[in-house]
Image: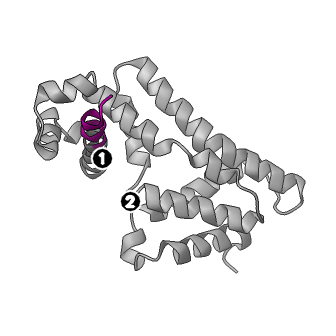
Amino acid sequence: MKSTDNLNAERILQDGWELFQQKGYRGVSVDEICLRCGITKPTLYYYFKDKENLFVEVLLRRLRGFHEIIEQSGPLEQRLERIVLSMLDSFPSSYTHLVHDLEHIKQRENADRVRKAFADELFSPITALMQSAIEAGEIGGDAKFLSQLFMGIVENYISRAHELGGDNKLLAQKLVAFFLKGAR
């Protein structure tokens, strides 16, 4: 791709991400994406086969790289704080409605790609981290359950982080402290 092509594709992915987060998959039209990007439909279709393909590429792009953050070394508390901070920064609004929008994806291979990316980039690495912490005696319980609990706690604050003053680092510390120590 030429640099202009890269800039166009980047703009479509970024603007698409913002629109999909604000309105969900069904709430965004191809016309709206084109208007926001300042492009024509043929230009959009040059880069992405259709709206579904764009949505899938946007999600895959947003999920990419989480496993690297999760797999960084350090004490458990610090590692969990990095994960939370990264999730808060990457998903300014709830990610569950984006995953829920997968039910509107018609092509099974597209839905499978997103589910696999979610598992490979977030859920499986977090579960492995929890299992490692269990084996080290840092926490107790079932790794899969703890992963779901941890992600649920974070999800509840993703869309409200800006309401809480916008200090994502402090919020990450508080959420991890609550996860590890409970409400004492």
For the point 64% across and 69% down, which residue is it?
Answer: 176
For the point 62% across and 43% down, which residue is it?
Answer: 123
- Circle 2 Cα neighbour tier, 10 Å, few/some/many (<14 / 14–19 / ≥20): some
Residue 63 is situated, as x and y percent measured from the top left of the image, at 49, 43
Magenta-highlighted residues: 1-10
Residue picked out by circle 2: 92
Residue picked out by circle 1: 14
182 with respect to 9 (left or right):
right
- Circle 1 Cα neighbour tier, 10 Å, few/some/many (<14 / 14–19 / ≥20): some
Front in this rendered view, residue 47 or 67? 47
Whether residue 50 is situated above or below residue 25 in the rendered picture: above
Quadrant of res 174 = bottom right
Q: Which quadrant of the figure contains the C terminus?
A: bottom right
Q: Can you tell which of label 2 and label 1 is closer to the viewer?
A: 1
Whether residue 108 is situated above or below residue 47 in the rendered picture: above
Quadrant of res 139 = bottom right
